[in-house]
Image (spheres, rainbow, N blue to C red):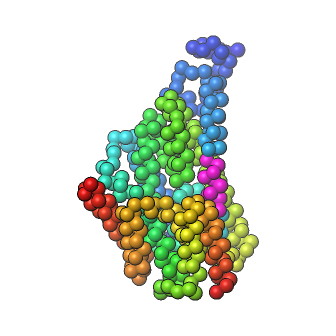
């Protein structure tokens, strides 16, 4: 029940965001600052998800040390991403690195 | 053959077999030829989306695989792919579910994460405002990062006539290919998850972190962006203890505020 409610809510919210401007068919336009602000949304949200996931793999305390496989693999992913600038390569090498570190540590 | 007079001399199709989409702006047009063009555009749209689809396949599969262990039922995972159809927010929902977050908070987070789609519709609105309401609703529903990238690129390279006549058919091709693939990959992932119950130990959950890292890096070209990301990271650690995963929203909004202020201040100086 909770699950159906959650999915319905997510669907309504997502569709509304995508539809509201198209529904108005150009009668409503954004102020310039709002467009700039929207540019910051994806990196802000994604970073706020990545950092705790990587630094707090067990969900309660920060593990900033060399025993933390997610932290090491994330460093590898950042370096690969900066060099290759290709999403798929970053993901694949990041995951291989994670598997390797987990196995080694 | 034809029992209906048409302006064209090669009308061999009775007007009763209306081409799909008759009722759109084009009236003085040979229906048979137009139908061929529609099919051509649908295929072109699908074909142009293939590189994006290749990129989406692993995510769809991983989403399906991780669903059950995160606390989302297989049916729920399929329903999410069918009705929400927004990859990154679906992933985030799994992460939040696994952390025991309630539905309202997940919906609120979905809102923040998908706000970027406002940009996409803002960019498209001039090219689709001549279309009917249902068409615009369909375009809105399918407005993923991938289909937007594909259609925006095509629009940029096309002339006015193409935009007026074919933009929706090309989009339909792009959307159906993305949509069908996303649902299929979700199902494949769920099946894999059931075949290998210990798949949770394979480190697939790191795939999400790796994906997001790869998505953030291209943004880091300006100082305001860098400031935004640093604030988001620091705040997310500082607010990790907040109830209901509120920390995510607080961090994202503070980072946005810092990035925007920095941008506006540095622009004023020039």
Q: Residue at x 58, y 67 (%)?
A: A80
Residue A13, placed above or below residue B155: below
Residue A59, placed above or below residue B16: below
Residue A19, placed above or below residue B25: below
Q: Residue at x 67, y 78 (%)?
A: A100
Q: Nearer the viewer, residue B4 or B20?
A: B20
The quadrant where residue A67 appears: bottom right
x and y percent of residue A41 in the render?
41, 61
- Residue A5: tell me if it is visible: no
x and y percent of residue A36 in the render?
35, 55
Q: Is residue B182 left or right of residue B165?
A: right
Q: Is residue B73 left or right of residue A65?
A: right
Q: Residue at x 62, y 57 (%)?
A: B55
Q: Which residues are magenta?
A: B49-58
Q: Name the dominant secondary structure of the magenta segment.
A: helix
Q: Based on the picture, tell me whether residue B236 belongs to the magenta stretch.
A: no
Check the picture and name the quadrant holding the N terminus of chain B.
top right
x and y percent of residue A20 in the render?
40, 49
């Amino acid at each position: 029940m909770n699950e159906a409610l959650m999915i319905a809510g997510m669907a309504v919210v997502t569709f509304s965001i995508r539809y509201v401007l198209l529904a108005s068919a150009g009668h409503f336009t954004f102020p310039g600052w709002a467009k700039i602000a929207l540019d910051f949304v994806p990196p802000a949200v994604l970073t706020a998800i990545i950092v705790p996931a990587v630094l707090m793999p067990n969900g309660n305390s920060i593990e900033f040390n060399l025993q933390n496989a997610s932290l090491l693999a994330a460093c590898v992913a950042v370096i690969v991403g900066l060099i290759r600038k290709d999403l798929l390569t970053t993901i694949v090498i990041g995951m291989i690195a994670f598997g390797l570190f987990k196995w080694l540590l | 053959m034809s029992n209906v007079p048409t302006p064209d001399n090669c009308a061999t199709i009775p007007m009763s077999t209306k081409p799909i989409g008759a009722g759109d702006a084009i009236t003085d047009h040979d229906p048979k030829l137009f139908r061929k063009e529609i099919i051509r555009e649908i295929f072109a749209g699908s074909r142009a989306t293939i590189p994006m689809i290749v990129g989406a396949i692993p995510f769809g599969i991983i989403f399906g695989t991780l669903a059950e262990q995160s606390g989302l039922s297989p049916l729920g995972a399929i329903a999410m792919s069918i009705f929400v159809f927004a990859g990154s927010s679906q992933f985030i929902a799994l992460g939040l579910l696994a952390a025991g977050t309630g539905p309202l908070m997940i919906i609120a987070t979905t809102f923040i994460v998908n706000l970027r789609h406002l940009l996409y519709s803002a960019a498209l609105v001039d090219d689709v405002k001549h279309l009917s309401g249902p068409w615009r609703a369909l375009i809105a529903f399918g407005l993923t990062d991938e289909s937007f990238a594909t259609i925006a690129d095509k629009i940029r390279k096309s002339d006015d006539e193409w935009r007026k006549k074919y933009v929706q058919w090309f989009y339909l091709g792009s959307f159906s290919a993305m949509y069908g693939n996303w649902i299929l990959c979700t199902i494949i992932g769920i099946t894999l998850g059931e075949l290998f119950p210990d798949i949770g130990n394979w480190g697939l959950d790191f795939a999400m972190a790796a994906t997001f890292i790869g998505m953030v890096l291209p943004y880091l070209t300006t100082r305001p962006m860098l400031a935004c990301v640093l604030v988001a990271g620091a705040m997310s650690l500082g607010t990790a203890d907040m109830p209901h995963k509120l920390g995510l929203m607080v961090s994202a909004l503070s980072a946005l505020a810092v990035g925007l202020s920095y941008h506006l201040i540095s622009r004023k100086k020039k």
